Image (tube, helix red, strand yellow):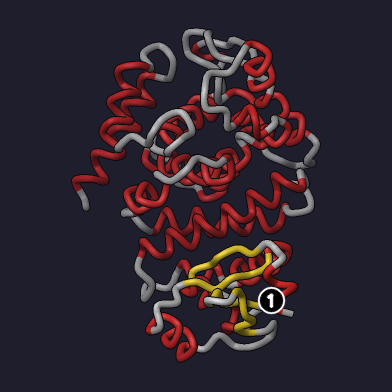
């Protein structure tokens, strides 16, 4: 069996995250990496006890591995206990932020790859409801999030970060209704859904895009909206965020070249979250900026491009959070 495992693709998960599975009963096989390759550690249905966790950590074993093909089973296990985990004050806020972010990234990756939002609708709603409850109950999440976000840019991670920024920003400007905040969360999650129809070669290109590549990239908001429009009952604001977050106040954006008040509010707000996330994340053609560098860049370079009052509020949000740390 070990020879078979060593020929398959595995994914590392920090041992801490196996605590988050319901009753610590593992929904899939787990493996350890040792000198001569991967070995079965615990089989599906076995209990990952606290003693086992402490034993691994004392040996310097911080990671267990799962088969990539069984990632969905792992995600279900974590999601099942997510409400309890996020409300557990015995777990530090920064760790709960990481759990929420990783659970969200896994789901977004799954949805983007399957292109089936409808099939996962209930899971998505549960996830964003958990996200809203956690973010509205904790005021120190922004800087915790940024400590996790400066790694390589991936569409999935970026979408989750935009979702979280959307909720925190909407909350900061006075939107308190959780149903509305849930819409802002899902708007962030799916604003780039259409990029699943754009080749990785274009998305990850290190140099500037040529005219043909740029034409394809500019179509992704329409791709996103087309996918989302097929979902019965999905709030129009979620579709609008996907369709209009690249429009600019001065009319130089895409896909329609809309200007000023013709751009829906949620499109304007998501645009700011989107730009900030991109600036504070390492990308193939630019390194991650600090919070100060990103906000300064936005102030200096986005005049007439994003909503002036919203950008001012966005900067205020970080200033307030910094003062309250």
Residue depicted at 60% across the width and 30% down the height: 203
Closer to us: 62 or 155? 62
In the rendered structure, the answer to whether residue 269 lies left or right of residue 287 reads: right
Instruction: Judge the density around disc 1: few (<14), some (14-19), many (≥20) Cα neighbours within 10 Å.
Output: some
Count the numbered circles shown: 1
The quarter of the image holding the N terminus is bottom right
* x, y percent for residue 8: 71, 65
**In this rendering, position of residue 5 left or right of residue 292:** right
Q: Residue 323 appears at what percent x and percent y?
A: 19, 46
**Residue furthest toward the front?**
36
Helix, strand or loop under label 1: loop
Q: Quadrant of residue 264?
A: top right
Q: Nearer the viewer, residue 281 or 271?
A: 281
Does residue 303 appear left or right of residue 18 in this picture? left
- Seen at 41% across and 30% down, the residue is 286
Up-down: is 260 above or below 185? above
Residue at image mark 1: 28
| Quadrant assignment, res 245 | top right
Q: Where residue 27 sits: x, y (%)?
A: 68, 77
Residue in the image at 50% along x and 53% along y: 132
Judge whether residue 128 can be spotted in this image.
no
């Amino acid at each position: 069996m070990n020879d078979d495992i060593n020929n398959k693709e595995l994914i590392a998960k920090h041992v801490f995250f196996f605590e988050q599975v319901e009753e610590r009963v593992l929904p899939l096989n787990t493996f350890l990496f040792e000198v001569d390759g991967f070995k079965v550690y615990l089989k599906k249905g076995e209990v990952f006890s606290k003693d086992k966790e402490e034993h691994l950590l004392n040996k310097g074993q911080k990671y267990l591995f799962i088969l990539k093909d069984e990632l969905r089973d792992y995600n279900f296990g974590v999601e099942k206990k997510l409400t309890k985990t996020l409300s557990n004050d015995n777990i530090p806020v920064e760790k709960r932020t990481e759990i929420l972010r990783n659970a969200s990234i896994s789901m977004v990756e799954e949805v983007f790859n399957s292109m089936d939002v409808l099939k996962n609708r209930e899971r998505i709603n549960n996830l964003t409801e958990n996200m809203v409850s956690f973010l509205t109950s904790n005021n120190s999440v922004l800087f915790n999030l940024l400590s996790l976000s400066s790694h390589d840019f991936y569409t999935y991670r970026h979408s989750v970060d935009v979702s979280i920024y959307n909720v925190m920003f909407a909350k900061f400007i006075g939107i308190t209704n959780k149903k509305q905040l849930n819409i802002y969360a899902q708007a962030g999650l799916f604003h780039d859904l259409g990029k699943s129809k754009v080749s990785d070669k274009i998305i990850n290109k290190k140099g500037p895009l040529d005219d043909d590549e740029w034409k394809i990239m500019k179509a992704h908001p329409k791709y996103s909206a087309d996918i989302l429009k097929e979902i019965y009952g999905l709030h129009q604001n979620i579709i609008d965020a996907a369709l209009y977050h690249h429009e600019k106040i001065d009319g130089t954006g895409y896909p329609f070249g809309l200007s000023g008040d013709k751009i829906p509010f949620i499109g304007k707000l998501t645009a700011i979250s989107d730009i900030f996330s991109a600036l504070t994340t390492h990308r193939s053609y630019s390194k991650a900026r600090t919070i100060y560098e990103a906000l300064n860049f936005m102030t200096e370079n986005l005049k007439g491009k994003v909503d002036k009052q919203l950008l001012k509020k966005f900067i205020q949000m970080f200033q307030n959070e910094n003062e309250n740390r």
